[in-house]
């Protein structure tokens, strides 16, 4: 059975929202009346009826208990629950999307990890060769740094005598030699021969 909640709400809002009671008419019939509307005088009794006479007291009590105020409260509670469910459904959907994205990322990183591990294993011999070459290069650098360069500092006359060239050439050669000695010392290499 489907309940038209909007129609039920409109009906409940259109009637008196007071609480209801059951009135015993004294002749085995009952009426549902608005609470507080019963007035008794010496010769009269007035009230605001909700139903005509009902012969079953349990039915009359149920009708009185399920009044418009109760119906509206139940509808409000139902609306809140449905909003809560909708919110939780949205959160669950968001969580499911996040979990899906994380799974895709995890698979991507697992794949990358596997490829890197495979490359390392495939190239393990070449790594050994590279380490060996690195150690050889480090030893050679240490040998070269420990060595002393032997550069003789010659005079212009000695250069002219040894080479047979002009004085201008000999002066240029000596200036170049002095520059070389200076640069070698600046680089931290020992120079011998002075």
Image (tube, helix red, strand yellow):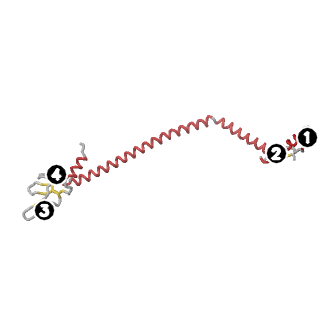
Q: Nearer the viewer, residue 55 or 77?
A: 77
What SS does tag 4 mark?
helix
In the rendered structure, are the residues bearing label 4 and label 3 in contact, judged by CB atoms less than 8 Å apart?
Answer: no
Picture residue at 66% right of the left edge, 35% below the top = 126
> Label 3's element?
strand
Q: Which residue is mark 4?
A: 59
Residue under the image location 90 percent in, 43 percent down: 156
Number of residues whose C-alpha sits closer than 10 Å to that of mark 4, classed few (under 14), some (14–19) or many (20 or more): some
Q: Name the residue tied to disc 3.
A: 39
Would you name the residue on which mark 1 appears? 160
Residue at image coords 12%, 57%: 24
Say which label, 4 or 1, has the lower sequence index: 4
Foreground: disc 4 or disc 3: 3
Mark 4–mark 1 distance (CA, rounded to whole Å): 138 Å
Q: Decide which of tag 4 and tag 3 comes sooner along the chain.
A: 3
Q: Please tell me how crowded label 1 is: few (under 14), some (14-19), or many (20+) other residues with Cα within 10 Å.
A: some
Q: Which residue is mark 2?
A: 179
């Amino acid at each position: 059975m489907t309940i038209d909640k909007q129609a039920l709400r409109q009906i409940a809002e259109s009637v008196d929202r007071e609480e209801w009671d059951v009135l015993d008419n004294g002749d085995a019939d009952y009426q549902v009346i608005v609470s507080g509307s019963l007035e008794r005088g010496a010769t009269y009794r007035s009230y605001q009826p909700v139903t005509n006479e009902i012969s079953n007291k349990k039915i009359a009590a149920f009708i009185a208990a399920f009044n418009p105020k109760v119906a509206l409260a139940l509808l409000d509670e139902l609306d809140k629950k449905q909003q809560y469910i909708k919110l939780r459904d949205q959160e669950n959907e968001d969580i499911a999307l996040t979990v899906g994205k994380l799974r895709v990322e995890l698979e991507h990183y697992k794949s990358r990890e596997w490829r890197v591990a495979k490359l390392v294993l495939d190239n393990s011999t070449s790594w050994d060769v590279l380490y060996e070459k690195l150690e050889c290069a480090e030893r050679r650098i240490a040998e070269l740094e420990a060595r002393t360069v032997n550069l003789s500092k010659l005079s212009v006359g000695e250069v002219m005598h040894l080479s047979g060239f002009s004085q201008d050439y000999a002066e240029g050669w000596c200036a170049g030699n002095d520059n070389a000695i200076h640069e070698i010392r600046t680089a931290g290499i020992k120079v011998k021969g002075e």
